[in-house]
Image (tube, rainbow, N blue to C red):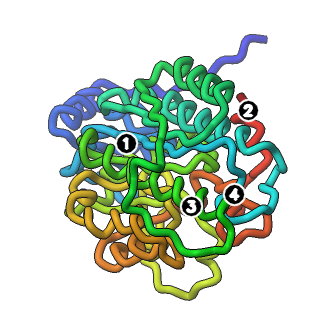
Amino acid sequence: MKKIENVKKPNFLKKIFVKLCRIAGFEIVDQSNLYLPVSERFANSNLASLGKKIINVPLGETKISRPVKSLDIIIKTCTSVNLVTQSKNRVFEQEKSEYTFRSINSITKSLNYNQDLLKKIKTKIYIIDYNSKQEDLKKIRNILSNSKINFEIIDLKPDEHSQIKTLSKGNPVIEENMKATMASIHRSLLIAKEKCEDLIYFVEDDYIHKKESLFEIVSTYEKISSEQNKDLFICPIDYPYLYKKFDTSNIFLGNKYHWRSVGESLLTFLTSKSLINKYWQDLKLMSEIEHSPFETPLHKIYEKELCISPLPTLAIHCTNVNSIFGLSPNIDWNKLWEDNEV
């Protein structure tokens, strides 16, 4: 027997009312089924319109006064070094190149997953590569080419960055790896300052992202910066080590995720060109003098500027399984890893 669906058709007066609300810029919710007739979407769907507004039912609408113009993603890659200062195995125990491939693939998939919503924003990926094999670089290029996202691959030469001063570790190999890491940071900061227009996302090559990550990050940036009337920093990771601290956090509602204020992060973070310029000298310190902990200059900036982190995480950091800087809690790590196989 053919199924007959019971669909309530809006009456004439209701149609007129919806049209008037649309003209006036108001949103209404049909409480019987949580349908928003003005936006023509249900309440549990994505209610963000980049550059215009974000709706969180039942809190209402946030007008966007700080629209994002562009998103530049700067990924530091090195498939020849496992962990810069350690010899431990990473979670899943694969070759370092596999983490790089899946990290880049996850970012391109995230951009393409919401490409219709992100199409108004200029997007480009920069790869700053140090000492990767040619076959690995070829695979990276293929991933990016197939994604149809504008990209540029830069061959890093650490000797061109003579300002670097590393801490003595009694191990020339580790010291050379750290010098390359700091040179990569310096080059990424120069790209941000000289080539980028608005948001810059600095990413290390062992962070695998959820498919909704990039849109959630951008839409949340617009929402929180509009509400706070200032630019900010975003860390896309819910780091386990933050649960070892008893710091006070403020809780924010983003687009589809909750976020909390944090005072620390590693080197994968997003911020604006204006904050790069404002804290240029402080950020450069990470590429000139090795600190302990390494991110100390960044943490000092967070004492003056807002940095937020998602709950739950939007990506995983593929370090050793026992590392407090690695796997974020309450997430299906295996699925995220398997979904981003190249």
Which image quarter holds the C terminus?
Answer: top right
Q: CA distance from mark 3 to mark 4?
A: 10 Å
Q: Amino acid at mark 2?
A: Glu
Q: Earlier in the sequence, mark 2 or mark 4?
A: 4
Helix, strand or loop at disc 4? Answer: loop
> Looking at the rendered structure, which numbered label has been put on residue 159?
none
Going 29% across and 53% down the picture, which residue do you hit?
272
Specify few, some or many for label 2: CA neighbours under 10 Å numbering under 14, 14-19, or 20 or more.
few
Q: Nearer the viewer, residue 76 or 26?
A: 76
The answer to whether 145 appears left or right of 99 in the picture is left
What SS does tag 3 mark? helix
Along the polypeptide, which appears first: circle 1 or circle 3? 1
Instruction: Look at 36% across and 32% down and name the residue there.
Output: 123
Residue 77 can be seen, yes or no: yes
Amino acid type for the residue under numbered disc 4: Leu
- Residue found at the very far top of the displayed protein: 2
- Image coordinates of residue 126 in percent, x first then y, are 43, 36
Residue 331, image quadrant: bottom right
Q: Which of pointers 1 and 2 indicates the residue nearer the eye?
A: 2
Labels 1 and 2: the sequence-earlier one: 1
Q: Which mark is residue 48?
A: 1
**In this rendering, the label closer to the viewer, 1 or 4:** 4
| Residue, disc 4 | 83
Where is mark 3, residue-wise?
178
User: What's the distance in space between the residues labelled 1 and 4, CA to CA?
Assistant: 38 Å
Please report whichever mark, 1 or 4, sits nearer to the chain's N-terminal start: 1
